Image: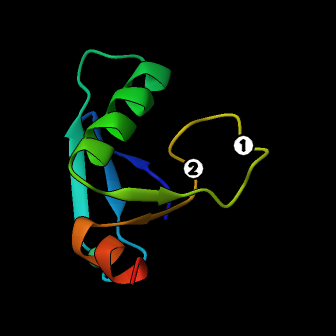
Amino acid sequence: MTIKAVPGAHLQVTCTNCNATKTYCAKSDTEDVAMLKATHAFKVANWFCEVTDFTARSVGVGRWYCASCYRLTRR
Ligand SMILES: [Zn+2]
């Protein structure tokens, strides 16, 4: 599940495994900057992005896992 924009100027990411969601508030940023900041914020929160499309030009594209599911995938 890739980061997607949510009405109200938020970016939301959904865990591929358990459908947990995390949002990032990106009110005053452009879309590109918001994606970068959101990706960073999610990674700081221990969310993990498994890159599935290496030709994608934007960050945050791929399968996302929440912190607890990421631990499970690393066994
Ligand atoms: Zn999860």
In the rendering, at what x and y percent does residue 18 appear? 31, 83
Whether 74 is drawn above or below 38: the answer is: below
From the Cβ of disc 2, is ligand 1 less than 8 Å away? no
Amino acid type indicated by mark 2: Val
Rate crowding at label 2 as few (under 14), some (14 to 19) or many (20 or more) other CA atoms within 10 Å. Answer: many
Question: For the residue labelled by badge 2, is the local secondary structure a helix, a strand or a loop?
Answer: loop
Label whose residue precedes the other's in the sequence (2 or 1): 1
Residue wearing tag 2:
61
Residue 59 makes an appearance in the image? yes
Question: For the residue labelled by badge 1, is the local secondary structure a helix, a strand or a loop?
Answer: loop
Rate crowding at label 1 as few (under 14), some (14 to 19) or many (20 or more) other CA atoms within 10 Å. Answer: few
Residue 17 makes an appearance in the image? no
Viewer-closest of 6 and 72: 72
Residue at image position (49%, 23%) is 32
Residue wearing tag 1:
56
Q: Quadrant of ligand 1?
A: bottom left
Q: Residue furthest front?
A: 75
Q: Quadrant of residue 57?
A: top right
Residue at image position (26%, 38%) is 41
Q: Are marks 2 and 1 in contact (CB under 8 Å)?
A: yes
Relative side of 20 to 4, left or right: left
